[in-house]
């Protein structure tokens, strides 16, 4: 059995909107990998997915987050701290 890109129904960032898009398993991360990369808990990642703040695709019973969506979330939520002069 080879792992090739396939078409999967994916939930978009807008709640209730369903779209068909090609999904490659190589571009998607597990909830654990996202939590480790962002240094947050897995529960926080699940909350972000369920609230729509972080788009995810469901593969069977688990969620996968694209690397691009994770990076976009990281940029949106970054806080810049300016040292006092």
Image (spheres, rainbow, N blue to C red):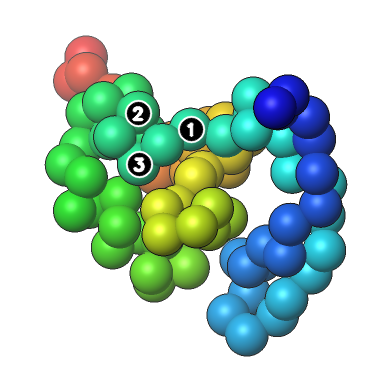
Residue at 38% across / 69% down in the picture?
A: 50
Residue at 62% across / 85% down in the picture?
A: 16
Residue picked out by circle 2: 33
Q: Is residue 82 visible?
A: yes
Give the alpha-carbon distance from disc 2 to disc 1, as whole Å.
6 Å
Give the alpha-carbon distance from disc 3 to disc 2, as whole Å.
6 Å
**On-image quarter of the C terminus:** top left
Q: Are marks 2 and 1 in contact (CB under 8 Å)?
A: yes
What element does badge 2 sit on? helix
**On-image quarter of the N terminus:** top right
What element does badge 1 sit on? strand
**x, y (%) of residue 70?**
50, 38
What is the number of the mark on residue 51? none
1 or 47: nearer the viewer: 1
53 or 29: nearer the viewer: 29
Label 3 environment density (alpha carbons within 10 Å; few <14, some 14–19, many ≥20): many
Residue picked out by circle 1: 29
Label 2 environment density (alpha carbons within 10 Å; few <14, some 14–19, many ≥20): some
Q: Return the residue found at the far top.
A: 85
What element does badge 3 sit on? helix
Q: Are marks 3 and 2 in contact (CB under 8 Å)?
A: yes
Res. 83 image quadrant:
top left
Residue at 29% across / 34% down in the picture?
A: 32
25 or 29: nearer the viewer: 25
**x, y (%) of residue 49?**
41, 60
Residue picked out by circle 3: 31
Q: Is residue 15 above or below residue 46?
A: below
Label 1 environment density (alpha carbons within 10 Å; few <14, some 14–19, many ≥20): some
Q: Is residue 42 above or below residue 46?
A: above
């Amino acid at each position: 059995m080879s792992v090739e890109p396939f078409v999967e129904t994916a939930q978009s960032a807008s709640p209730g909107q369903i779209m068909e898009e090609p999904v490659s398993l190589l571009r998607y991360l597990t909830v654990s990998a996202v939590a480790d990369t962002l240094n947050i808990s897995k529960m926080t990642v699940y909350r972000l997915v369920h609230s729509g703040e972080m788009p995810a695709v469901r593969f069977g019973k688990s969620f996968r987050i694209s690397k691009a969506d994770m990076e976009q979330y990281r940029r949106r939520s970054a806080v810049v701290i300016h040292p006092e002069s």
